[in-house]
Amino acid sequence: MFDDFKQFLAIKRYSPNTAKTYLGLLNSFQQFLGETIPIHQADSSVIRKTFTQKVLKENLAYSTQKQLASAIRLYLNTMHNRSIELTTVTPRKPQKVLPDVLSAHEINLILNSITNKKHHTAILVIYALGLRSGELINLKISHIDGQRDQVKIVASKGRKDRYLPLPKDLKERLREYYKLYKPKEYLIEGYNHSRYSASSLRAVLTKALEKSGINKKVTLHTLRHSYATHLMEAGVNIRVIQELLGHNDIKTTLIYTHVSRVHLEKIPNVMQFLQ
């Protein structure tokens, strides 16, 4: 039903992850709406009512609810030249929550608990380069330039490429990994040299957290947060960190000033004013 829209997303160079998310959400919404009424033929009031029912019944997360609204608007506008008002069902911006950060010691505990070389390399690269999980999954051998010591991140979030420095010690570990596994296309590959799955990557981290005894709420993205915070604590300029992370807005990067231990240590002890 959404083949034309899938082609549109590809032509417009939407990232594979965004296209997959939008198509999945539209298919899910169509099933909830009922196969007898295509989305583009449904009345706007019916779409809004169904949207509300789906969000409440399935307890959709903020990001999923927002993406669903975006997917419906884009689909109707581009494929059927139809605009729809969804402000009443679009979620308001949630309370800003500071990211959890792991210490270098905790990162080491996680890595040391992973005995499988491929799994160890996957988690190491995410932290060492500050990658999103999708960026690691899509990272190809051809994107790693050992001559210039650079790693190219292609068509990442925001549909822009960026280059990252390849640390010497990481380069040596990648060479050892390559000799052992000989990946053909992607740096981290699944069965029969297929692209590794996000669920498998999450499972690797979950198992490592259990073995290392870390009880913090940790996700793969926590490794990226930790990378940025550790760079800031080492004195790297915030603008450089912004480029390394691929943030469009410096405000997104500035959140790490709130979790940096160095910034907190510089705050004077107010108890001294009482003496």
Image (cartoon, grey):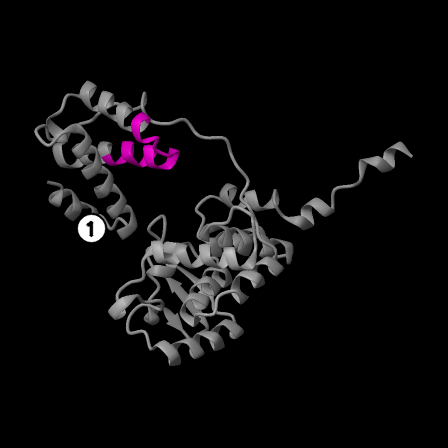
Location of residue 76 in the rendering, given as x and y in whole percent from the top left corner: 17, 32
Q: Which residue is mark 1?
A: 10
Quadrant in the picture for residue 44? top left
Q: Look at 69% across and 44% down and name the residue there.
A: 264
Q: Main secondary structure of the magenta part?
A: helix
Spot the residue most to the bottom.
179
| Label 1 Cα neighbours within 10 Å, binned few <14 / some 14-19 / many ≥20 | few
Residue span colored magenta: 56-71
Location of residue 71 in the rendering, given as x and y in whole percent from the top left corner: 25, 36
Judged left or right of residue 18, residue 265 is right
Please state which of residues 210 and 232 is positioned toward the viewer in this rendering: 210
Judged left or right of residue 29, residue 56 is right
Spot the residue most to the top.
45
- The quadrant of the image that shows the N terminus is top left
In the rendered view, tell whether residue 159 sits above or below residue 195: above
Q: Look at 17% across and 28% down and name the residue there.
A: 33
Location of residue 112 in the rendering, given as x and y in whole percent from the top left corner: 54, 67
Please state which of residues 191 and 70 is positioned toward the viewer in this rendering: 191
| Residue 269 shows in the view | yes
Q: Look at 42% across and 66% down and name the residue there.
A: 119
In the rendered view, tell whether residue 191 sits above or below residue 99: below
Please state which of residues 268 and 202 is positioned toward the viewer in this rendering: 202
- The quadrant of the image that shows the C terminus is top right
| Residue 161 shows in the view | no
Judged left or right of residue 38, residue 252 is right
| Three-letter code, disc 1 | Ala
65 is within the stretch colored magenta: yes
Please state which of residues 110 and 184 is positioned toward the viewer in this rendering: 110
| Badge count | 1
Judged left or right of residue 184, residue 80 is left
Secondary element at tag 1? helix
